[in-house]
Image (cartoon, grey):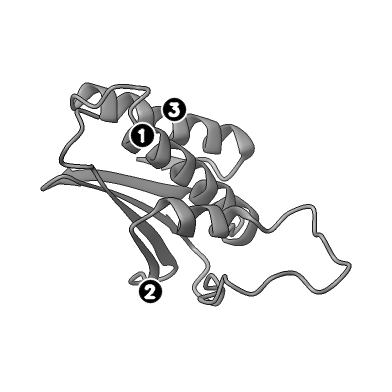
Amino acid sequence: MRFSSTPRGVRLARHLALERLHAWGLAYDAPTARAVELITGELCANAVQHGTVAGRDFELRLTVEAGTARVEVSDARHETFPPTDLRLPPQAGELPESGYGLRLVAALADRWGATPRTPIGKTVWAEVRKPSASVG
């Protein structure tokens, strides 16, 4: 689905992801569902903050296959890709008020990355494997 590149679009995308997972049989409070909800919110917020081009929406794609939930968020900016090394701590004495979203994604996801999108833009994706021993 496509959403407006606004905070409201981010909220709607996050809620839609959780509702879709529930419709597919994953309980709202299941750890996998909560992880996907948070990841969706962070990736969509980043698309709005860093990937917005005037007049362009962002796109959310959610799939669940073979016990793995995959979130893909696409935007229209191809020249900005997320940093790959998120292990670097802030400089001594610096604690930024923002910039922790991708660290959260990296902590919650089993895998994540970004790929160019044709004809323009990029897709940032994350995968969360559903624990095989649990119901949710």
Query: In this rendering, is residue 125 above or below 9?
Result: below
Label 3 vs 1, first from the N-terminus: 3
Left or right: where 96 falls relative to 37? right
Pick whichever of labels 3 and 2 is earlier in the sequence: 3
Q: For the C terminus, which image quadrant?
A: top left
Q: In this orientation, which residue lies closer to the viewer: 98 or 8?
A: 98
Numbered badge on residue 116:
2
Give residue 123's position: percent from left, percent from top: 39, 63
**Residue 15 disc label:** 3
Query: Left or right: where does residue 87 sit relative to residue 71?
Result: right
* Disc 1, SS: helix
- Amino acid of disc 3: His
What x and y, as percent, mark residue 48? 59, 51
Q: How many marks?
A: 3
Q: Residues within 10 Å of mark 2 (few under 14, many from 20)?
A: some
- Name the residue rendered at 75%, 69% in the picture: 90
Residue 62 coordinates in the image, percent (x, y):
29, 44
Pointer 1 or 2: first along the chain: 1
Quadrant containing the N terminus is top left
The picture places residue 14, in percent across and down from the top left corner, at 46, 34
Please tell me the numbered disc located at residue 31: 1
Query: Based on the displayed image, in which of its 4 quarters is residue 16 positioned?
Result: top left
Q: Is 111 situated above or below 69?
A: below
In this picture, residue 121 sits left or right of residue 82:
left
- Look at discs 3 and 1 and give the one toward the viewer: 1
Q: Secondary structure at mark 2?
A: strand
Q: Residues within 10 Å of mark 3 (few under 14, many from 20)?
A: some
